[in-house]
Image (tube, rainbow, N blue to C red):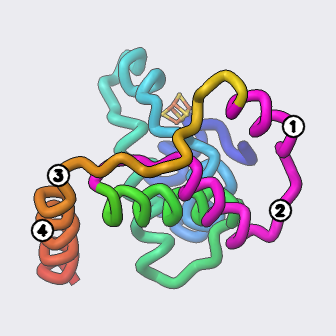
Amino acid sequence: MDLTPTQVIHAVRLGLRDLVLDSKTIWICASCETCTTRCPQEVDIARVMDAARILARREGRRPRIPEVAAFHRSVLESLRMFGRLYELGAIGALKLRTMRLTEDLDLGLRMFKKGKFRFIPAFANVLATNRIFRRVKKAERART
Ligand code: SF4
């Protein structure tokens, strides 16, 4: 992270838009909500990070950590297609997007041997999932 979460909140309060939206921090934040849970001022820091990512994308800013944006896109595509995460497909899409084809190959093989990946995707309620995607898109359009 190039800014601490505290610095991000401070920058938001000061209106330092470029500093926040062009930071690495907003992309590295995993939205784990640890800071939100522990914040003595009850600031929902994870939500601020989410909002900053959305704004950065909406404004067409290039993500400072493009691999993270590629990861989000790959996971969301998988959810849309299968109604649930198909890990192998999402990883394949991520590898193609980042062109880091052989990176983490040994880790992937070890996970595969332990049965962490399915070869065949399992489908969940694809129609319901797609309804959620459509609702989100509609809400986004209404806001812009
Ligand atoms: S949500 Fe988690 S990853 Fe993001 S800033 Fe807070 S503690 Fe860090």
Binning the other alpha carbons within 10 Å of mark 1 as few (below 14), some (14 to 19) or many (20 upward) gives few
Residue indicated by mark 2: 100
Residue indicated by mark 3: 125
Dot 2 or dot 3: first in sequence order is: 2
Residue indicated by mark 1: 106
Q: Quadrant of residue 139?
A: bottom left
Stretch in magenta: 83-112
State which mark lies toward you, 2 or 1: 1
Identify whether 58 is placed above or below 96. Answer: below
Dot 4 or dot 3: first in sequence order is: 3
Marks 4,3: beta carbons within 8 A: no
Please say whether residue 93 is one of the residues in the magenta stretch.
Answer: yes
Task: Choose between 110 and 4: the one closer to the eye.
Answer: 110
Query: Under tag 1, what secondary structure?
Result: helix
- Residue 68 location, x and y as percent? 63, 56
- Residue 55 location, x and y as percent? 42, 70
- The CA span between labels 4 and 3 is 16 Å
Residue indicated by mark 4: 135
Binning the other alpha carbons within 10 Å of mark 3 as few (below 14), some (14 to 19) or many (20 upward) gives few
Q: What residue appears at the point 29 percent right and 51 percent down from the top-left corner?
A: 123
Q: Quadrant of residue 77?
A: bottom left
Residue at the limit of the structure toward the front, as seen here: 120
- The CA span between labels 2 and 3 is 31 Å
